[in-house]
Image: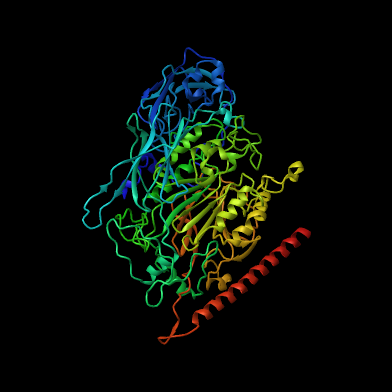
Amino acid sequence: MAWLVAPVLVAMAALPRVSGHTGPSKLSAIQPPTFALDPDITLEVGPTLLFESGQWVTVSWSGIESWMFPDAFVAAFSPGTALDYPATVKEVAPIKYQFLTAEKPFPGVGHEAETGAVESLRFRLLNLRDAEGYRFGLFKGGVEDPVLVARTTEAVTFAQPFEVLHLHLALTSDVDSMRVSWVTGEASQAPAVMFREVAVGAQEGVTETQVDPWQEVAAESSITYGREDMCGEPATSNGFHNPGLLHSAVLPGLIPGHPYEYKAGDSDAQEWGSSSFFYAPPVSSGTTAAHQQRAGSPEQPSSAGAAFSPPLVNTVTASGDASTADMSGKGSRPEMAALAPSELDNASGIGAEGIAWDPDAVKVAVFGDMGTAELDGTLDAGHTSEPPSIRTVGILNDHLRGGAGVRAVGSSGGGDGVSTGPTGGGEEPQLGLVLHIGDLSYARGYDAQWDEYMDQIKHVASTVPWMVGVGNHERDYPTTSESPVRQELSFFTGTDSGGDCGVPTAFRFIMPGAAEEPTADCPWYGFDFGPVHFTVMSTEHNFSVGSKQYAFIKEDLAGVDRAKTPWIVFSGHRPMYVNSGGAGAGECEGAAALEPNCANDQPVARSLRAALEPLLIEYQVDLAVYGHHHSYQRTCRVANETCVGPSSRTYSSQYQEYQEHQDYTAPVHVVMGMAGMGLSQNMVSPRPEWVEYATDREFGLGMIVADSSKLQLSFILDADGQVGDEVVLVRLPPPSTSAVEEDGIPVEGAELSRGYAYEKRNHARKREISKAIGEGNTRRSKRVTG
């Protein structure tokens, strides 16, 4: 439904669909400027009063010819008092800047003229909650030797002290709740969220939208962080900016899959932000219920306001009665029948016309390494600007519109008589959740960059849960904070976070489990979303055998109920399998080679495999996704660097025996670090034998669609929104408990024979895997000794 999708900026539609960079990429950090005000140069800005974050101002100048000073630039400072004195201007980095001769980044956005010299520039300003507002300075000498020659006298301020900013959603540890987080200035005294269920007509007797009364929930926390909580420069020096008050509230008692309206604000002042909408987290209907529905078993009748019915988890006998067969074995996949390819297609819902999705299907976007870029084409102090990230967010907005839309509350769905969310049977669902697996904003110590990131994702993140993992550019730093907030070093002790050491991420994005406490520094968690269980680790914390994170991963994987969530997706920032070579990828040298936590790509991948790959195989993880390397790479089903099966049953005729039955062998590993930050382009040739597909020439994102029997991962290209690569994993229905018939006569002992045949084939498959791994070890040994 259109009302569930926040409006996208009109300018977004005008963005070029390109796969490469569309503007300046590698930037130089602005050095501390000197003061040399020139009375002959004037600088003005207008309007000076803005009513909401993201409005535009125009900065104009006189007394200087732009074409004569190609390295001159205009910079925005907040708080504007930083421009008052020579000392203060050195202590605060500018929020953003543009060169006087800047070209327009996108048609129709940013500047007064198409290209070339202009006498004014336009800036899009975010509400940074500073009472002093923005002021602008004009600098000669370029970013390496800047000289302040003019400044605006009047500040640009915002009229709304209670403006709700950075509204975003996240799942919690409870399946019937949703976390809402937002930011305000320090004037907010009673932060709260109002929410209500929305029933959209279609059920009998309902002709228009109906809504429940508003409920109000006070924020459970209002926190912030300071310079003393960060670990080093620039986060502790000129990069720091007051983050405001970070509020968080949990909305309880939600009905799975039902739509809700909500708005955040201040209860005492009765100042509320605009309404947004979301679907309560879905629950899986269970593997067997979906298979029953596909097999044509009778649906449960629906009724308005019907009580919640637990999902069916048992098979159906020949008479249609529920069996008492136990399907709740945790940590292991229910056995799957061996069918011929044609039977497999029919049973799984994959036909010649495409995939027919069950009503419990969900869609999840997954990617890493996005970064930010501004619509006005401005640059930020010391960072890269990545226009492809804007297109990635545009693709996410496109997928919010997919699917069948809202269905009536109380309508049948998922085979259990309960609406399971924004999808009807057969159709691909609309986007339901985002998982950004590390390297989020690339703020790297410049805190205002988090405001840019939150503004860029706000339409999506306020509509679906935006879950995050931690990357090296969030966490890594070689020292700790002055305060107790960060008293443990990151596992890899580089300076990639710019002194942030994970603090802004933990305070802004409160994730489930131990990650709910921002000061705990335990950013690992698991959650269910429909038929999929996600395990999120931190590759920037100790993951070795015996560590507390290792214990969590083992416990989380072992506790998955495969009857309810038949799929497991494992995620972390640094990849366990990656084709990467050159500087920063191979073995460490010198003293660093002696360290157990060498941060180069291949040593890290080797450490991840040594510690965690046995767990992934033991608990039958289906898919493992990563970022870090700015490319897209997909493996076969791989164990110990050896292919033990194709990624997809239709991949290649060389795996003909695997096309006939989809027994578990090993995970498929996928690197998806191509969401916006500059592409790595350091893959080696010939590529490793376990790489089935890879490209380092395209930006994009991953999109998972899954129901109880199928999981499809697609690489969506930023260039045109089309599919660049795809893999489909199929999970067959469990064997029927009814007796097999021959000519209409039940055959006694048929199930026993089928079970014996399955076990026999499974043991044979394990021997094949062991043999393949052994042969792979032999080949690698020969390469090393040769």
Residue at the image point whose x is 60% and y is 42% from the top: 472
Residue 78: where, in percent of width, then height?
A: 47, 24
The number of numbered discs placed on residues in the rendered structure image is: 0
Which sits in the foreground, 749 or 505? 749
Residue in the image at 23% along x and 50% along y: 208
Q: Quadrant of the C terminus?
A: bottom right
Residue 35 makes an appearance in the image: no
Q: Is residue 455 left or right of residue 270?
A: right
In the shown orientation, is residue 717 left or right of residue 611? left
Most foreground residue, 321 or 641: 321
* Residue at the limit of the structure toward the right, as seen here: 785
Residue at figure coordinates x 49%, y 66% from the top left? 730
Q: Which corner quadrant of the image does residue 689 belong to?
A: bottom right
Q: Position of residue 416 (x, y in %)?
A: 36, 62
Q: Position of residue 443 (x, y in %)?
A: 54, 35
Q: Position of residue 99 (x, y in %)?
A: 49, 28
Question: Please, which residue is most extreme toward the front here?
Answer: 324
- Which residue is more in the foreground, 663 or 374? 663
In the depicted structure, whether residue 455 falls above or below residue 580: above
Above or below, 319 relative to 145: below
Q: In the rendered image of this protein, does residue 325 appear above or below residue 445?
A: below
